[in-house]
Image (cartoon, grey):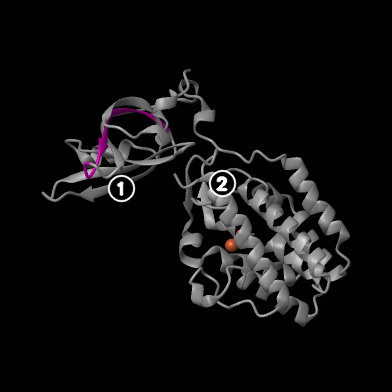
Amino acid sequence: MRGKLDEDFVLNLDSRRPIKSKFVIAEKNLKKGKTNKFYIDLTLADKTGEIIGRIFPDDVNEAINTIVEGEVYEIDGTVNEFPRGSGKFNIIVKNFNLLNEKEYDLNDFIIASNKDQSELKKEIKDTIDQINNENLKNLLQRFFNDSDFTLKFYNSPSAKFHHHNYIAGLLEHTVGVLKLCKQICEFYPELDSDLLYTGAILHDVGKLEAYSYNRYATCIKLSEEGELLDHIFISCEMVNQRLKMVDMPVDIKNKLLHLILSHHGEVKNGWGSPVSPQIPEAVALHHADNLDAKVKGMLQNPLR
Ligand SMILES: [Fe+2]
Ligand SMILES: [Fe+2]
């Protein structure tokens, strides 16, 4: 088994040349060219990014049926700049061969959180232990004492692109937001910290259902639920379901659901919230969420 050469990582494909290297085929789509001839459009990926690949086989239907999304292939083709001089590159694929697990180095394809995951889990557990409001604590325990939930929550990526798009990305993002909220509460001690911390821990739980990903998150996609319902609605549904199992005063219940619904900020921004933040804890959660996502996003994808 041989790992990828440095120059063959997506990040380094910046000149026209032949290439024979290993990529995950993250997506395949049948497309029609200008001359009405069908071709296959591929999203090729490794841990450094994605590049478009194009195949023009004699029998497109047969070729597309053989491709399994999420698997690693040896791709033989040419790096092509299109349009010329644009700095945008794709790969014209001549041949593709499915590889088995012994034929590639998994580390070339997966990105996992580099944070200590047991520390991240402990931060959430310690926070729940310290919540004074028994109703909110009980609600959080309904989630975190459920091993089906935690198994998914601790592994899920937090996005397809942009930020925390890797195994345990959701856990890392949630703890990032939670820690920022703790700083905000030091600065504004009047805030209801129990409410804010509960909102921080639960704000993105819907992402468990909003994304589907293969074993190693080499191929993260929006699930049908994610596409049609969005993670904000799904998060509310998941919290609502468990709220039915606990005794929660209606004003706290409404505030908590409001925090989740408004965590993407002002409706007029068009970032997905159906209601704008109306209480200080909701404003705090939105800014903590946005800060963690934006800073991490830029750290992962610096402007070059
Ligand atoms: Fe979100
Ligand atoms: Fe978030």
Residue 78 included in the magenta stretch of the image? yes
For image coordinates 55% across by 72% down, the residue present is 273
As drawn, which residue projects farthest toward the top?
A: 1
The residue indicated by pointer 2 is 299
* Residue 217 seen in this snapshot: yes
Q: Is residue 79 left or right of residue 8?
A: left
Labelled disc at residue 280: none
For image coordinates 62% across by 65% down, the residue present is 235
Picture quarter with ligand 1: bottom right
The residue type indicated by label 2 comes to: Leu
The residue indicated by pointer 1 is 29
The residue type indicated by label 1 comes to: Asn
Q: Quadrant of residue 45?
A: top left
Q: In this picture, which residue range is highlighted in magenta?
A: 72-84
Q: Secondary structure at mark 2?
A: helix
* Residue 208 seen in this snapshot: no
**In x, y percent, where is residue 228?**
46, 65
Q: Is mark 1 within 8 Å of ligand 1?
A: no
Which of the two marks, 1 or 2, is nearer to us in this view?
Answer: 2
Up the image or down, 111 lies above or below 6; here it is below
**In x, y percent, where is residue 171?**
67, 50
Which residue is more in the foreground, 61 or 73?
73
Up the image or down, 183 lies above or below 161; here it is below
Residue 46 included in the magenta stretch of the image? no
Crowdedness of circle 1 by 10 Å Cα count: few (<14), some, many (20+)?
Answer: few
For image coordinates 26% across by 48% down, the residue present is 30
Q: Is residue 296 left or right of residue 35?
A: right
